[in-house]
Image (spheres, rainbow, N blue to C red):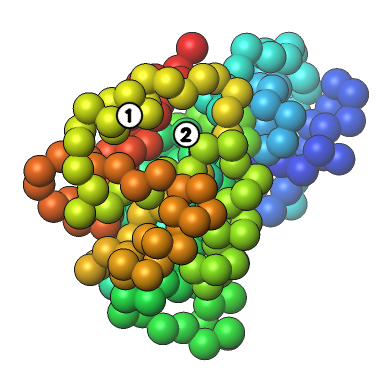
Amino acid sequence: MHQFFVEPEQIQGKQIVITGSDVNHIKNVLRMKAGEEISVSNGSDGKEYRCGIEELREEEIVCELRFVKEEGVELPSKIFLFQGLPKGDKMELIIQKAVELGVFEIIPVASKRAVVKLDKKKAENKTARWQKIAEAAAGQSKRRIIPQVKGIMSFREALNYSKCASRRIIPYELAEDIKKTRQIFDNLKPGEDIAVFIGPEGGFGNDEIEEAVREGAVPITLGKRILRTETAGMTVLSILMYHLEQ
């Protein structure tokens, strides 16, 4: 079943009105007809609104609400991914897969070793594109919320922002003791918000790791092999999903 996102105000009692680019997608790409059923989410309350298409107008699709499904598909903990800016288009893949794995927010980080340097205008354009990728991934994976991609932050800004989480972990190539890593994951409890810091190519600098530790972040190892930046985040998120899924 196809899922679409709407703003909360587009859900009025038994009537749901879809507007924007989804209108063309429903009419001309999916070629859906009146009577067919679709799934709608407002991106914030975690509910699925199951409805039937009533009328396909030129600039909007009018639907009738059939029932509301409140059973959650979201993880019981909010996971914040602080991703060091990677080269090329890797960030797009990282965002797509992070959303599929249940991330709550993605925060791009301009860390010390990040090769990519963006001026204000380019950063805004990139963030807007990344948000669209997050929305598409949320729809494809039947998420009930659209994870937000925040504006690019410095490492210091990211550390300050991560104080919203009760747990902060940072994979580090010089960290040791895989047993400690297992223990940290095993001790996670549903409902604890978790911040995950992933370095860019070349990882975080030693001074950044020291600063993060002073702020309460815990360095962990992900094994004896060096993982690419686009692999490390997916590895951590996969482990978190396994431990937290209910």
Task: Classify residue 6 by image quadrant.
Answer: top right
Q: Residue at x 20, y 36 (%)?
A: 177
Locate residue 148 relative to residue 30 in the image: left or right: right
| Image coords of residue 32 (percent x, y) | 55, 32
Q: Nearer the viewer, residue 19 or 212?
A: 212
Q: Residues within 10 Å of mark 1 (few under 14, many from 20)?
A: some
Give the secondary structure at mark 1.
helix
Locate residue 10 relative to residue 67 in the image: left or right: right
Q: Residue at x 30, y 42 (%)?
A: 220
| Image coords of residue 228 (percent x, y) | 20, 56
Locate residue 240 relative to residue 174 in the image: left or right: right
Q: Is residue 183 above or below residue 145?
A: above
Locate residue 236 relative to residue 225 in the image: left or right: right
Q: Residues within 10 Å of mark 2 (few under 14, many from 20)?
A: many
User: Disc number at residue 183?
Assistant: none
Q: Estimate the spatial distance between the alpha carbons at disc 1 and disc 2, rounded to whole Å.
A: 11 Å
Q: Residue at x 49, y 68 (%)?
A: 155
- Of callouts 1 and 2, the N-terminal one: 2
User: Disc number at residue 239?
Assistant: 1
Q: Is residue 105 visible?
A: yes
Q: Residue furthest left?
A: 225
Q: Residue at x 67, y 13 (%)?
A: 69
Task: Classify residue 223 by image quadrant.
Answer: top left
Q: Is residue 85 visible?
A: no
Q: Nearer the viewer, residue 241 or 58?
A: 241
Closer mark to the observer between disc 1 and disc 2 = 1
Give the secondary structure at mark 2.
loop
- Residue type highlighted by circle 2: Gly
| Image coords of residue 140 (percent x, y) | 45, 36
- Residue type highlighted by circle 1: Ile
Residue pointed to by mark 2: 102
